[in-house]
């Protein structure tokens, strides 16, 4: 495995020495946008003991296949929990891995979203509360493996989120569900000014997440269905990524991002040499906004910390980058989040996410994820 000495700082003056460990978009951030990469030692990762047990118990049971142009038809069977393919043989198996990788069975997070222009710096910031629950193929906390309230509708996960600040956004909320089948996210939004709950379909064709530079599918690297894309492993390499970023929790975005210096979006975090799969992705959906994507899939966490997205002309459009933090208890809980960001290189604009608080596997009540609770919390 290629490596860089811990303590090294990669910058535009020495980036040629580690060019092989950076994808093209990240190299551009270093050369043109003055990103500095502080290298720390590689640290191994393992999921919870229960997730490992589920992986071993279900080894060899999951089947996946290419559904061709019929991308609304399920292309998998017999997935029962854990990592489906510890040694993925192709891009489709790898995609199914990161869509089912270990993130715990629920999460409760308070986070800030900040909009940034390379020309003028911070434009605005919003403060949100987001709760999520894996509703199928759970491994860590009861009810396992499925939450009965959502079983009949074949729900994979449920989320509910509320705006806390600024005042004019306070009370706005969204409730949404992802399915075990390759269909759009569905849910509801609560609009305080109207005092109404509106049913919503969060489409697959490039809907922006909360008017940011993220699409819904960009969250976590890729949040869509495996059936929607063609997947091809084009390499296995060692790359520098912020898996254990050391990003600090708190209200001050300056603790994580260098917002004072141009281009105002560079993260101040730790990066490690990581084994990755390089995954080329092309959409089956005709009017999908990206012509293709390049994903780096970490070969231990099976997360997607880095993505390059290209426009219809084939030019680099966006970079999606995310970093984590170590788990407070690797035997029972997932890693902590660190930061997230989407950079629109063509507009020279970014949206960044930082965290104030995160708790996983706390045993959230399924009744949190209801329309009545969405309306109640919005008032």
Image (cartoon, rainbow, N blue to C red):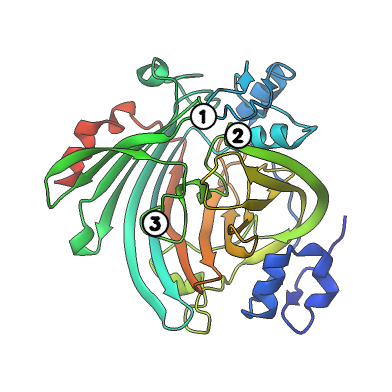
Mark 3 or 2: in front is: 2
Picture quarter with the N terminus? bottom right
Instruction: Report the side of 205 relative to 316 (left or right).
Output: left
Q: Nearer the viewer, residue 301 or 72?
A: 72
SS type, badge 2? helix
Instruction: Report the side of 74 relative to 296 (left or right).
Output: left
Mark 1 or 3: in front is: 1
Density class for disc 3 (Cα within 10 Å; few <14, some 14-19, many ≥20) is: many
Where does label 1 land, which residue? 182
Density class for disc 1 (Cα within 10 Å; few <14, some 14-19, many ≥20) is: some
Q: Nearer the viewer, residue 340 or 359?
A: 340
Where does label 2 land, which residue? 226
In the image, residue 280 sits, relative to residue 178, either above or below, namely below
Q: Do the numbered discs 1 and 3 sit on residues whose CB atoms are within 8 Å? A: no
Where does label 3 land, which residue? 111
Instruction: Report the side of 180 relative to 189 (left or right).
Output: right
SS type, badge 3? strand
Q: Which residue appears at 55% of the width and 25% of the height?
A: 139
Q: Position of residue 56 (x, y in %)?
A: 72, 21
Identify the disc placed on residue 354: none
Q: Position of residue 17 (x, y in %)?
A: 85, 74
Q: Do the numbered discs 1 and 2 sit on residues whose CB atoms are within 8 Å? A: yes
- Marks 1/3: CA distance? 28 Å
Say whether disc 3 or disc 2 marks the residue closer to the N-terminus.
3
Quadrant hosting residue 356: bottom left
- Marks 1/2: CA distance? 8 Å
Q: Which residue appears at 66% of the width and 37% of the height?
A: 95
**How many tags in the picture?**
3
């Amino acid at each position: 495995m290629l490596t860089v000495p811990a303590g090294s700082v990669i910058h535009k003056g020495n980036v040629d020495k580690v060019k092989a460990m950076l994808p093209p978009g990240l190299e551009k951030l270093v050369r043109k946008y003055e990103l500095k990469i502080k290298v720390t030692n590689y640290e191994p990762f393992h999921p919870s003991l229960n997730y490992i047990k589920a992986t071993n118990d279900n080894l060899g049971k999951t089947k996946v296949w290419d559904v061709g142009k019929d991308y609304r038809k399920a292309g998998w069977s017999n997935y029962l929990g854990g990592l489906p393919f510890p040694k993925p043989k192709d891009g489709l198996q790898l995609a199914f891995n990161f869509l089912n990788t270990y993130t715990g069975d629920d999460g409760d997070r308070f986070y800030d979203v900040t909009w940034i222009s390379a020309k003028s710096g911070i434009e605005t910031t919003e403060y949100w509360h987001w709760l999520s629950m894996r509703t199928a193929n759970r491994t860590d906390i009861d009810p396992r493996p499925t939450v009965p309230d959502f079983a009949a509708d074949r729900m994979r996960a449920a989320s509910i989120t509320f705006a806390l600040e600024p005042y004019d956004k306070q009370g706005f909320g969204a409730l949404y569900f992802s399915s075990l089948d390759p269909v759009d996210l569905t849910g509801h939004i609560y609009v305080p000014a109207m005092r109404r709950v509106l049913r919503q379909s969060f489409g697959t064709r490039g809907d922006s997440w909360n008017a940011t530079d993220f699409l819904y599918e960009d969250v976590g690297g890729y949040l869509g269905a495996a059936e929607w894309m063609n997947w091809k492993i084009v390499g296995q390499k060692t790359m520098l990524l912020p898996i254990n970023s050391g990003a600090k929790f708190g209200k001050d975005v300056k603790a994580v991002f260098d917002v004072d210096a141009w281009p105002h979006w560079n993260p101040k975090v730790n990066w490690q040499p990581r084994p990755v799969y390089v995954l080329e992705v092309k959409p089956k959906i005709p009017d999908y906004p990206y012509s293709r994507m390049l994903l780096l899939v970490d070969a231990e966490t099976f997360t997607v910390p880095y993505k390059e997205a290209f426009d219809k002309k084939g030019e680099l459009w966006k970079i999606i980058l995310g970093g984590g933090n170590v788990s407070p208890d690797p035997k029972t809980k997932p890693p902590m989040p660190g930061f997230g960001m989407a950079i629109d290189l063509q507009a020279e604009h970014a949206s960044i996410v930082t965290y104030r608080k995160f708790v996983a596997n706390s045993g959230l009540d399924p009744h949190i994820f209801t329309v009545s609770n969405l309306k109640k919390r919005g008032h």
